[in-house]
Image (cartoon, rainbow, N blue to C red):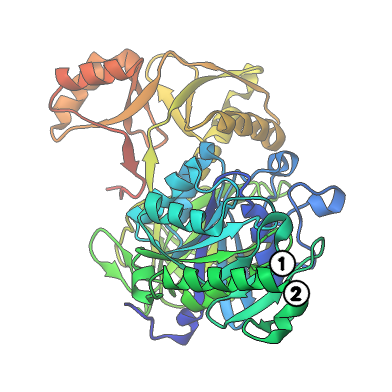
Amino acid sequence: MYEPKTEAVRRRRTFAIISHPDAGKTTLTENLLLMGGAIRMAGQVKAKGERRRTQSDWMKIEQERGISVSSAVMTFEFENTICNLLDTPGHEDFSEDTYRTLTAADSAIMVIDAAKGIEAQTLKLFEVCRLRDVPIITFINKVDREGQSPFELMDEIAERLALDTVPMMWPAGMGGLFKGLIDLKENTFLPHTKGEEGTGEAVDFSSDAMAQYIPEKELETLREEAELAQVASPDFDLDLYRAGAMTPVFFGSALRKVGVRQLLRGVTSLAPSPRPQKTTVRTVEPDEGKVSGFVFKVQANMDANHRDRIAFMRLCSGRFKRGMKLKISSSGKVISVHNPILFFAQDRELVEEAWPGDIIGIPNHGTIRVGDTLTEGEDLVFTGIPNFAPEILQRVRLDDPMKMKHLRRALESLAEEGVTQVFKPKIGANWVIGVVGQLQLEVLRERIDAEYGIKVGLEPAPFETARWVSAEDPLELKRFVDANQGNIAEDRDAAPVFMAKSAWEVGYITDKWPNISFSATRERQAVEA
């Protein structure tokens, strides 16, 4: 098990929160920030007025709909540990943004609704974590509402996710009978009063003092349950958890601030410090002296007054200092990073230094893109940040033809963020955009209007899917492109893309051109010659 030698690196925890929509992820995020002293009042997604303004959902559409559509980064300190929290979109239409964000996380908190159990999006995001061996802490939320029994929920996690489950906290009752939480490791009880927030002072779970909180008959049943939960579960093994084979399970209510502090303590004590990261040539360790990192997200117009563009870089090695020069992998350009920033959602502050595990923002004018590696000079490319073939293709119809240049700038900017993919057909003037889900189209249209002042319409393109095409023989690729002009477009890197009218056409063309490779993904880190 890798442990960094540098104290500043050992203090870092960089983790993401994953869940199905409405499982309570954003509310949990707010209350984790509250526990870390980062905010005075946690915003609630379904609250009104000032309390509605959650810190992690800062886009207008997010605040109006009560959903997360853009990954937010927040840094705060909790009990001498620096936490870099990545709040990912829960909506499946933004899974590509979530996938990229998970490349920057060393661990994850999986939020599960106690009533609904494991839902479709949770399963998808878990599989992404499994592919990357990201260790997971489970938080079963909403225990103050009627739900499944804790044993049923634990069994479901074990069976559907093939994970060993180890309860760390245990609910004393569920729904209307919820009385508090049992800390199984410390053998203490944290009482909760219905209608209030948080829990009271810890009480010895074996003591007679428990009688003032729970009737004797209920208490006897509860002690049997707690004992069974421990006996039926394996002992917690830190190595198995960090290998992604075991999950410690916490119970609580994010809305009532119950169990949130215990969850955060679990993250700081159990989750790994920054881990080694793979590149195309070698593995980079956090303790190395030279700075390296990769860009997993680009966000334009976080401040509408400044038309800014911020590249979110996950530091992988070295001690970053403000003003240092870094080389960009895709272009070979060297830039001076004079105004690096740390994030608190859309709020920010200049940072003088940062360490592996930290996420820093680099203001730029389009020179840095998603997938770029930045180093102190070494030619490295961190792996694992692909583009995915879109599932929905639409033509962009411009209401005012005089704004074509502005539209192109807007589309390219949003494509750099990963909000959409942009394709320019070889034949025809209309741009084609590709997205994973329908909601992305609504967000795209609203943002082009709000941030660029351009009214656009979207209409179905005559294509159903897209595949990147390549060949070992450049002449063979040219022959293919020339023979299929009506189906060929270029992405924003000028890479050729075959636009197919159906899955059947993809299969037909693949058989017809055996020397051409058709790919549903394309690595973003390709280094330009």
Give the numbered dot on residue 179: 1
Q: Is residue 370 left or right of residue 302?
A: left
Which x, y percent locates residue 452?
67, 34
Element type at marker 2? loop
Task: Single out the residue that lies furthest toward the front.
Answer: 217
Binning the other alpha carbons within 10 Å of mark 1 as few (below 14), some (14 to 19) or many (20 upward) gives many
- Residue sitting at x 24%, y 17%: 482
Q: Quadrant of residue 467?
A: top left
With respect to residue 57, does 444 lie above or below? above
Q: Disc 1 to disc 2, how far (Cα)?
A: 8 Å
Q: Is 288 or 198 nearer to us in this picture?
A: 198
Q: Which callout, 1 or 2, points at the residue further toward the start of the chain?
A: 1
Task: Single out the residue that lies furthest toward the right.
Answer: 49
Residue contact at pointers 1 and 2, CB within 8 angstroms: yes
Binning the other alpha carbons within 10 Å of mark 2 as few (below 14), some (14 to 19) or many (20 upward) gives some
Q: Is 162 or 12 nearer to us in this picture?
A: 162
- Residue sitting at x 63%, y 24%: 403
Q: Is residue 452 visible?
A: yes
Which x, y percent locates residue 284?
31, 70
Give the numbered dot on residue 213: 2
Q: Quadrant of residue 213?
A: bottom right
Give the amino acid type for the residue marked by disc 2 in the picture: Tyr
Give the amino acid type for the residue marked by disc 1 in the picture: Lys
Which x, y percent locates residue 205?
63, 81
- Residue sitting at x 54%, y 68%: 225
